[in-house]
Image (cartoon, rainbow, N blue to C red):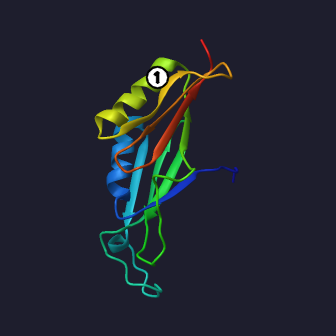
Amino acid sequence: MAHSLATYISLPGTTAEAMEHWHEVFGGDLTIMRYGDMSMPDMPFEPDPEAVAHATLVMPSGTIAGGDAMDDGNDYSVEGTAYSMLYTTDTPDEARGYIQKLLDGGGREGMPFEMAPWGGWYGQAFDRFGVMWSFSCDGE
């Protein structure tokens, strides 16, 4: 089996909605498995059958996986952390298109997409779930 690295994110009960939104924005193949779809009698907790146990969005550029965070008393903040999804595109227009789809879907601009001091393009947008998406591409 080949090695791979994927992003995994836990969201507070919004994983299905987020994955469906990202599928609309970026395309790819989406699979969502809910706890009610599985037979696991020895679970150490009683999950909501509609909660997402595991979801994957496989794109040519990579994979995003995730599930709903369980109410275990931990704070699983998404926005306001140092973490982001970094998406590298071939052209600035391609990145602008993805950013616009995130904004049209209820997101907001974090940092304008423009030429960065290192010579490439860079910018950020927050989607409606609070996830920061950083976009970059080489200079023209």
In this rendering, position of residue 87 left or right of residue 27:
right
The quarter holding residue 25 reads top left
The quarter holding residue 37 reads bottom left
Q: Residue at x 34, y 59 (%)?
A: 14
130 versus 47 height, above or below: above
Q: Residue at x 47, y 65 (%)?
A: 76
83 versus 91 height, above or below: below
In this rendering, position of residue 47 left or right of residue 111:
left
Task: Tell me where residue 109 appears, x and y as whole percent.
Answer: 40, 34
102 versus 14 height, above or below: above
Q: Quadrant of the C terminus?
A: top right
Task: Tell me where residue 41 appears, x and y as whole percent.
Answer: 42, 86
Count of numbered marks = 1
Observer-nearest of 85 and 62: 85
Callout 1: SS: helix
- Mark 1 is on which residue type? Glu
**Circle 1 is placed at which residue position?**
94
Task: Tell me where residue 125 appears, x and y as whole percent.
Answer: 44, 37
Q: Residue at x 48, y 73 (%)?
A: 74
Q: Quadrant of the N terminus?
A: bottom right
Q: Residue at x 44, y 63 (%)?
A: 67
Circle 1 residues within 10 Å: few <14, some 14–19, many ≥20: some
In this rendering, position of residue 99 left or right of residue 7:
left
